[in-house]
Image: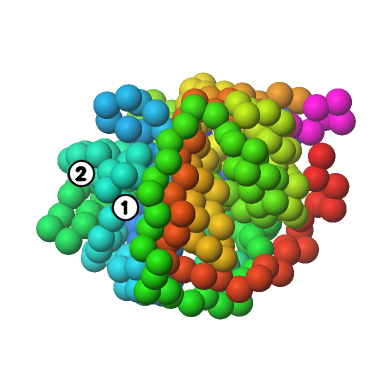
Amino acid sequence: MTGVYHAGSRALQDRAGVRESADHVGRAIGEGIKPVAAAFLELQPLLVLGAADPSTGAVWASPLAGPPGFVRATGPLQMSVTGGVLPADPLAAALATEGTQVATIALDPRTRRRMRLNGRLRPTARGFAVTAERVFANCPKYIQRRESYEVVAGPAPGRTARSGELSCLQREFIETADTFFVATVHEGRVEVSHKGGNPGFVRAGSPHELSWRDYPGNSMFLTLGNIASDPRAGLLFLDWQTGTVLQLTGEARTEGGEDGELRVRFVVTEAVRTPSAVPLRWSAPEYSPANPTRAH
C-alpha cells in the first residue's frame, strides 16, 4: 500500500498484527469524490476541519456549520465550502492562505456515517475550496446516534476566551463528553479523525493534561501513526446541545498500558473556548453499541 501508510502507521499495524486488514481497508482510499460521497456531503450541516496554523505551526481542529449544501462537491476532485470559521478561530489565518494542507471530516450522527476528505485549500469569494487528495469513508464504530438537530438564530457566538491551561469547568466538560475530534500531521499532510465512547472515556487528569484509551478501529492507525512521528495535535470538543466549542492544541504521545492496550496522553499548550460557536442543537445521544463499557 505504497503512498497510503507511512512508517509510523505501519509500525503500529505490525504491533497489533493487523497489516493485512489495514491493506484491505486502505484500498478504499482514493482521490476522487464518488457520487454517493457527493450526495452525502450535501446533506451535512457540520464539517470539522484540521490544519496547522501557518505562523506558529500549532495544529488545531475547528467546526464549520451551515445549511445543508454549504459543503458540496463541485467536481470529481473538488469540495467547495460556503462560509468559514469565526474570525477569532485559531484556523482563520490558515483558511485564508492559498495552498494550506487541510483535512476534513463530515460526520452525520443521524445515520452514524462519516467521510473524510484531505487536500490542499484555495480561498474563494464565498469561502474556500479543497482539491481532494485522499477521500474515504470510515466505519460507524463509536459514533453516538443523534436523531435530529435544530438550527437556532441566537444567541450570537460568545466571546472567545484563550488560556494556557484547562479550567475546572473545562475539565468537567471534557470528562462528560462522548465525542471529540483530533487533528494530526505528518510531513505536511493532515488527518482529522473522530473519537467516541461513553462519557468518561476521556480523562482530564490535570489543568495541563488529558488522556484517552485508544479503542480498536479500522486498523489503519492514521492518527496514532502521525503522533508517532510528529507529536503536534489539535482536539475539538463540541457541546452538542449548546453549540459551545472547546479547542485545544498541544502535543500527544502514545503509550502501552499494563493490559497491552494503547493510551494517548495529550499535553495542553493552549485552550480556546467559544460559547454558542455552532448554531446547531442536537437531540440526546443514543450511545454506540460498540462503546466499551469500561472506559479506563
Pointer 1: what residue? 85
| Up-down relation of residue 82 to residue 218 (above or below) | below
Percent coordinates x, y for residue 32 in the rendering: 34, 57
Q: Dot 2 surroundings within 10 Å: few (below 14), some, or many (20 or more)?
A: some
Report the coloring of the rendering.
Answer: rainbow
Q: Is residue 205 magenta?
A: no
Left/right of residue 74 with respect to residue 238 in the rendered view: left
Q: Is residue 260 magenta?
A: yes
The residue drawn where x is 32% and y is 65% is: 71
Percent coordinates x, y for residue 173 in the rendering: 64, 48
The quadrant of the image that shows the C terminus is top right
The residue segment tinted magenta is 257-262
The residue drawn where x is 71% and y is 24% is: 255
Front disc: 1 or 2: 1
Residue 236 appears in the rendering? yes
| First-in-chain label (1 vs 2) | 1
Determine the secondary structure under disc 1.
Answer: loop
Residue 63 appears in the rendering? no
The residue drawn where x is 30% and y is 68% is: 70
Q: Dot 1 surroundings within 10 Å: few (below 14), some, or many (20 or more)?
A: some
Distance in Å between CA atoms under marks 1 and 2 = 10 Å
Left/right of residue 249 with respect to residue 90 in the rendered view: right
Percent coordinates x, y for residue 74 in the rendering: 24, 65
Q: Nearer the viewer, residue 24 or 137?
A: 137
The residue drawn where x is 35% and y is 26% is: 57
Residue 102 location, quadrant: top left
Percent coordinates x, y for residue 88 in the rendering: 31, 44
Left/right of residue 162 with respect to residue 220 in the rendered view: left
Mark 1 belongs to which amino acid? Val
Pointer 2: what residue? 96
